Amino acid sequence: MSPSDEPKTPAPSELSPLLTKVLARLGGLVLEHTSFRGDDCIHVARENLLEAARALRDTTDLGFDLLLDVTCIDYFGQPDGFFNGPEAWDRDHEVIRRRAQWRQRVNVPSRGTEPRFALAYHLTSTRLLHRLRVKSRVPEDDPSIASLSGLWPGANWLERETYDLYGIHFKGHPDLRRIYLYDEFVGHPLRKDYGKQDEQPIQAYAGPGADQPRRPR
Amino acid sequence: MPDPEQTSRAALANVPAADSRADLHTPLMRMQMGPSHPATHGTVKMVLDLDGERVVKADVQVGYLHRGFEKECESGYYYQNIPYTDRLNYSSPILNNVGYCLAVEKLMDLRTPPRCDYVRVIAGEISRMCDHYLCVGAMALELAAMTPFLYLLEARELMCDLLDALCGARVTTNYIRIGGVSADLPAGFDRFAAERLDRSLKLLEDADKLLTQNPVFRERVEGTGHLPPEELVGHGVTGPLLRAGGVAYDVRRVQPYLIYGELDFDIPVGEHSDNFDRYLVRLEEIRQSRRIIAQCFEKIPAGPVNSDDPRVRWPRKGKVFGRMEELIDQFKLVTEGGLIPPGEVYHAVEGANGELGFYIVSDGTGKPYKCRCRAPSFSNMSALEKMITGGMLADVVPTFDLINMIGGECDR
């Protein structure tokens, strides 16, 4: 499949050498690709993430053996990506856009058809030394995606962190529990609808001796 | 969540049975090491299931220093977030400053003047030496070697003197700015630095003599904490740990930033992937940092240290109070945070513990929409469980220390 069939993508002659190789290998799995400031990025549907990741790791001339980072972006009430240019968004939503602290206060319906969350994976190869970002969109009503911890064991903790802070469920993860926050924490703090000053309910002490008075009277 | 009792039994079943177990029948003992343990530096809890002195199963729990770095960054302007990055890896703060500012500059497509790049490299390498001194010294202390700790802490103090001369602060420096640095090198800094560096290197040699050939020390570190290089790569381990495993992955070499492409320095590489090699790699990196700084002082050009780009240039105070254009300029910069284009970038630098990356998503306002820090300590710590499982309890201490987990960076 020729990449030029896809919308939003530049002509093959403008592709970076890495993206040429990636597109030749992954073909139809890549929904969209961008290069910004030398960072190559491909977008993959979440159903195909595991297949694409396996191909990226196991293909000899790609060889992405080092998973650097797993994180999530919450495009809550924002235009799809930010590459469309701020003008269109400014026209309708100037106040919200300009004052970041209002983003959490105003419940803006999400624009466009793109899902709310985007997972971002940063890959590199210790042998070929190139870098790639893989992004995959995840909708709000079913925030789940396949876990990559079977391919890179290091994804285990990174996905636990993403689950903790964004509430993304990684299917097939061996040990998906919170890593930074306590189990009773309500909500996921890096979501845009979680306010910076939001408070948490006070948890009663539940450890050993919780039924005893704290001090002898 | 699985039943811990069941899990430990299942884990025990995987351990090859030692001959002595047939008649001993010791039940597993669950020990909580940490979060504030005298033999670990760094706030981390390790729940260890012990069979005698062997670690059968380990659960490493981090997060005691979680302060919401990323949430905090989303509500600050780009230039306001630089002090927060000091508190990530607080033993090498300048490297964090450099990483963050380079990421923002990459987003803005901004070039800094050549002198600025040299100053950043000098300051960054001083900071890296600080970090390695502290790591090796604290490890020696926790293996009950008090003297090398004192030597290396003194060496670190000498490095802090240099940071003090650069920016007035010893630990939380806040030295690097977007598009430049807060101040040029002070007059005579090269002579001052050469003297301090030589003294600290001499202290390093003393500590080296006390430790490297010391049979008690070598008994503790040789062959312990071993993990084959392919597993290190799989766990996302970078930095001295990965290089001690024989993989010469150093961001300064594989993706040179600033002026590292023009400098002559070696990447020390180990071969056994054990604690002793990690220790040796760190020592050698200190010496290589010294080489880098010496070359920088030879080559450093004269010129400005701050970029002249109007998006980041702060107008001179005298003009701000007297002229309209500069006043507006200052006002817009302070209240809107500068003109940052929309887009997303990932930029990595070689931190003291590995690849330190900043992934910034900008929506075109003066505040980052998302500012993610790829912390080397975090990925390195995820491999700790593998390193200590199957080993002795006493090996946990050097393995953990040489990972050099920095709570501020790991927990963010």
Image (cartoon, rainbow, N blue to C red):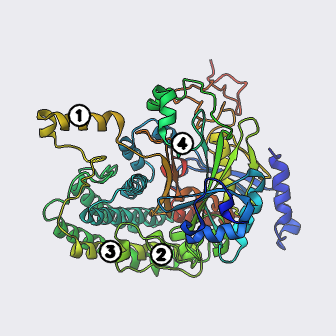
Cα distance between the residues tagged 4 and 1: 38 Å
* Residue A126 picture location, percent across and down: 58, 73
Q: Which mark is residue B328?
A: 1
Q: Is residue B233 left or right of residue B170?
A: right
The answer to whether residue B54 of the structure is visible from this angle is no
Going by the numbered disc 3, the residue's amino acid type is Ile
Which residue is label 2 attached to? B281
Q: Residue at x 33, y 33 (%)?
A: B335
Cα distance between the residues tagged 2 and 1: 51 Å
Labels 2 and 1 positioned on one and the same chain: yes
Characterize the local packing of mark 2: few (<14), some (14-19) or many (20 or more) Cα atoms within 10 angstroms.
many
Ranked by sequence position, the earlier of labels 4 and 3 is: 4
Q: Are marks 1 and 3 in contact (CB under 8 Å)?
A: no
Secondary-structure class at tag 1: helix
Secondary-structure class at tag 3: helix
Q: Which mark is residue B292?
A: 3
Q: Are marks 2 and 3 in contact (CB under 8 Å)?
A: no
Q: Residue at x 70, y 63 (%)?
A: A152
In front: label 2 or label 1: 1
Cα distance between the residues tagged 2 and 3: 16 Å
The one nearer the camera, B80 or A185, is B80
Going by the numbered disc 1, the residue's amino acid type is Ile
Ranked by sequence position, the earlier of labels 4 and 1 is: 4
Which residue is label 4 attached to? B66
Labels 4 and 3 positioned on one and the same chain: yes
Labels 2 and 3 positioned on one and the same chain: yes
